[in-house]
Image (cartoon, rainbow, N blue to C red):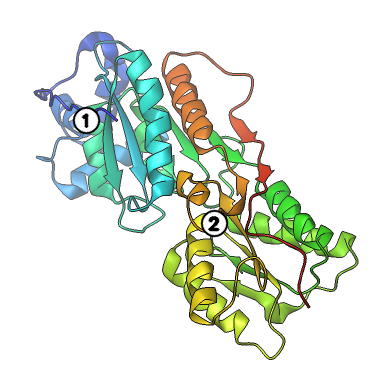
Amino acid sequence: MSPAKVQPQQEKASVDESSVSTATLAEIARAAGVSAPTVSKVLNGRADVAPGTRTRVEELLLKHGYRRRRGASQQSQLIDLVFHELDSAWAMEVVRGVENVAREEGLSLVLSESAGRLTPGQTWVDGVLARRPAGVILVLSDLDAAQRAQLTSRSIPFVVVDPAGDPGDDIPSVGAANWQGGLAATRHLTGLGHRRIGIIGGPTRMMCSRARLDGYRAALETSGVPMDPELVREGEFNHEDGYTAALELLRLPEPPTAIFAGNDLQALGVYEAARELGLRIPQDLSVVGFDDLPLTRWIGPPLTTVRQPLIEMAETAARLVLDLGRGRQPATTRVDLATSLVVRNSTAPPAR
């Protein structure tokens, strides 16, 4: 991946008259009791505005439905890409997909992390307003209503990838068929003869986690296998929580013969727990993951997993946000790409 190249632009106290509605700007300035240059500073994300004045101006921008006209002179050659967490192979796949499109378009990336929060802080929003990127892509994150209004008023388009919650019909988003993936993973295990199938889901605050769990539940029901709440665990999408949850499941009086992990990193934790307890995969325990990260092909044994097309999702989001920024209205702004089961060597019929 080529390094992100950010060329900071010298911010001006006022904006080009060609890029704003000066009458509306004047109205907002009068209503706020400030000068037009002060309103311009707020629009441009300048820091030298009193918090109370900034809030008052932002409220009036929203009330008046102000929206800066799009113009090439306004935008920098950047795409802002923000993650709630950036320390995983999953995130790197998304970065690679956005970078593919950015390279084709002659754009650079600005990467941000919101330190685990699903909504970025206002400092990040202020930076975006100052940079004026061609578009913003949020991964497993979202904006609150005020932040959305701020980007909208500056004509900065944004798209959410794998939204944490239901983004609503008016928020452009790109995701994957998580319910279908959970269904396919569990059906694969019931088809092998497993009846005690544990699941380690992701955090329930995330829509993708709930969809995968619902797919698991539906597959058990259609296979005539009663769902046992004792076999359901929840954790963050990381190795540590996968390991902890797997130990709990495998130490039950009647442990599962198979575990469907909410993602590949959790599945790696299941592998570690199985080794610690002296269990062989797949002879004693079948394991299915979710994502199909590159490393799943090289672990021993190679992991059966649900392929989530992360690079394609990121490329789709990048093209969508650039189209929106260019005034092109796509046929749909809510895209869910297909998932598929990739069968490798970590699953087999149960030994007991």
- Dividing the image into 4 quarters, which one contains the N terminus? top left
| Residue drawn at (43%, 13%) of the image | 326
Label 2: state its secondary structure. Answer: loop
| Residue drawn at (61%, 80%) of the image | 249
Query: In the rendering, at what x and y percent does residue 61 appear?
Result: 34, 33
Label 2, label 1: how many angstroms apart (C-alpha)?
28 Å
Query: In the rendering, at what x and y percent does residue 293 appear?
Result: 49, 46
Query: In the rendering, at what x and y percent does residue 208 appear?
Result: 59, 53
Label 1: state its secondary structure. Answer: loop
Residue 261 placement, left or right of 215: left
Q: Which residue is mark 1?
A: 3
Residue 80 placement, left or right of 186: left
Of residue 164 and residue 232, the one placed in the foreground of this image is 232
| Residue drawn at (12%, 23%) of the image | 9
Of residue 340 and residue 314, the one placed in the foreground of this image is 340
Query: In the rendering, at what x and y percent does residue 213 appear?
Result: 68, 61
Residue 44 in view = no
Callout 1: few (<14), some (14-19), or many (20+) C-alpha neighbours within 10 Å?
few
Q: Which residue is mark 2?
A: 263
Badge 1 amino acid: Pro
Which quadrant of the figure has residue 201?
Answer: bottom right
Q: Give the label on residue 233, or none.
A: none
Which quadrant of the figure has residue 137?
Answer: top left
Q: How many numbered discs?
A: 2
Say above or below: 277 vs 45: below
Say above or below: 346 vs 291: below
Badge 2 amino acid: Asn
Which quadrant of the figure has residue 139?
Answer: top left
